[in-house]
Amino acid sequence: MFRKDCPQCGNSSFSAAGSGSTWICPYCGLELIKEPLKNTNGSLVKFNSPDKEEQNAS
Ligand SMILES: [Zn+2]
């Protein structure tokens, strides 16, 4: 479940699919695809940094 905050009307839009070609605000119809993708708790989702544990086992 992902979230985007609409800069135009201020409402939060939620979607189960974070990666899509479009993300339309259900309240005002603004295209939100360029807005930063967030988790439902408001933290930013970073696609460029996949989860990897720093292992310093040597
Ligand atoms: Zn909106």
Image (cartoon, rainbow, N blue to C red):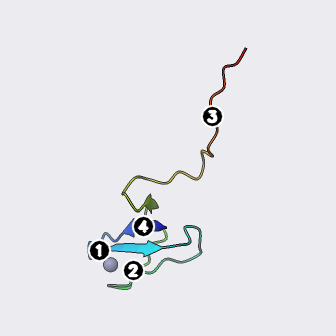
- Toward which corner of the image does residue 4 lie, by quadrant? bottom left
Which residue is identified by label 1?
11
Q: Residue at x 59, y 75 (%)?
A: 21
The mark lying in front, picked from 3 and 1, is: 3
Badge 3 crowding class, 10 Å Cα cut-off, few under 14, some 14 to 19, many 20 or more, is: few
Secondary structure of residue under mark 1: loop
The kind of residue on which mark 3 rests is Glu
Q: Is mark 1 within 8 Å of ligand 1?
A: yes
Q: Quadrant of the C terminus?
A: top right
Secondary structure of residue under mark 4: strand
The mark lying in front, picked from 4 and 2, is: 4
Q: Residue at x 44, y 78 (%)?
A: 31
Indicate whether 40 appears above or below 56.
Answer: below
Indicate whether 7 appears above or below 36.
Answer: below
Reading the chain from its start, which is encountered first: label 3 or label 2? 2
Which residue is identified by label 4?
3
Secondary structure of residue under mark 2: loop
Badge 1 crowding class, 10 Å Cα cut-off, few under 14, some 14 to 19, many 20 or more, is: some
Question: Is residue 14 left or right of 50 when viewed as pictured?
Answer: left
Which residue is identified by label 2?
25
The mark lying in front, picked from 4 and 3, is: 3
Q: Is mark 2 within 8 Å of ligand 1?
A: yes
Q: Residue at x 49, y 77 (%)?
A: 23
User: CA gap, disc 3 to disc 1?
Assistant: 35 Å
Reading the chain from its start, which is encountered first: label 1 or label 4? 4
Contact between labelled residues 3 and 4, with CB atoms less than 8 Å apart: no
Q: Residue at x 66, y 20 (%)?
A: 56
The kind of residue on which mark 1 rests is Asn
- Toward which corner of the image does residue 52 lie, by quadrant? top right
Reading the chain from its start, which is encountered first: label 3 or label 1? 1
